[in-house]
Image (tube, grey):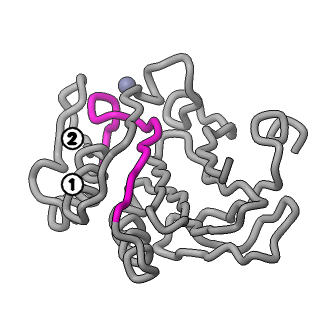
Amino acid sequence: MRIRHSIVNKPWVTLNQIHSNKIVRVSDTVNSDTVLTEGDALISNNLKCAIAVFAADCGNVGIVTDNGLIAAVHCGWRGLENKILQNTVKELLSMGASDIYAIVGPNIRKECYEFGEEDLKRLVSIYGNQAKATTTKKTPSLDINYCIESILESLNVKIAFKNNHCTKCSDEYFSFRKDKTSKRQALVLYFG
Ligand SMILES: [Zn+2]
């Protein structure tokens, strides 16, 4: 927690991430470091706390709305299959958001993301052929960024910033595929 608070000096609200489609609302009463429950997206209007998701190759997306909501989404291939990002944006819309902006964090890129054919078929059935790519080793891969960007575009979410680095082949990021690390990137959002 000391390291976390040196990055953002507010209580950190997080989840036990399970690659699900489950969204969790942060209530106004939370005011200390808290692991809320299982789930993969947080929605908050709590001014006191930061919200964070963690990933080391999976995608992570931060969202800000015009009606004072923030969201943090953990969105790897299972999350893409479970439609966690679509669910989160739809939930924000149902809560009255109209202008929605996204920040796309770093993840493993298609050039490096070797991916099983059977799993890839299911992702292609949802996101189309452009979800399917090829690594530099000529093996099948999943284009997580194509999937994320097509979801955001289809729901009229503007991308305010995207990190184009590959977690696996950049030295600056943690990558489970690179070295089985237990360390993670944090995507943190809070009200300033
Ligand atoms: Zn790479």
Q: Kindly report the secondary structure that dominates the magenta region of the rendered protein.
A: loop
Q: Quadrant of the N terminus?
A: top right
In this figure, which residue is indicated by the disc labeled 1? 150
| Magenta range | 99-115
Which residue sits furthest bottom? 94
Mark 2 vs mark 1, CA separation in Å? 20 Å
Q: Position of residue 121 (x, y in %)?
A: 18, 60
Q: Residue at x 50, y 59 (%)?
A: 73
In this figure, which residue is indicated by the disc labeled 2? 140
Q: Is residue 99 left or right of residue 25?
A: left
Q: Is residue 169 left or right of residue 131?
A: right
Answer yes or no: disc 1 within 8 Å of ligand 1.
no
Q: Position of residue 37 (x, y in %)?
A: 71, 74
Note whether 11 is above or below 183 in the view shown. below
Check residue 104 for magenta coloring: yes
Between 132 and 153, the one nearer to me in the picture? 153
| Neighbour tally class for label 2: few under 14, some 14-19, many 20 plus, Cα within 10 Å | many
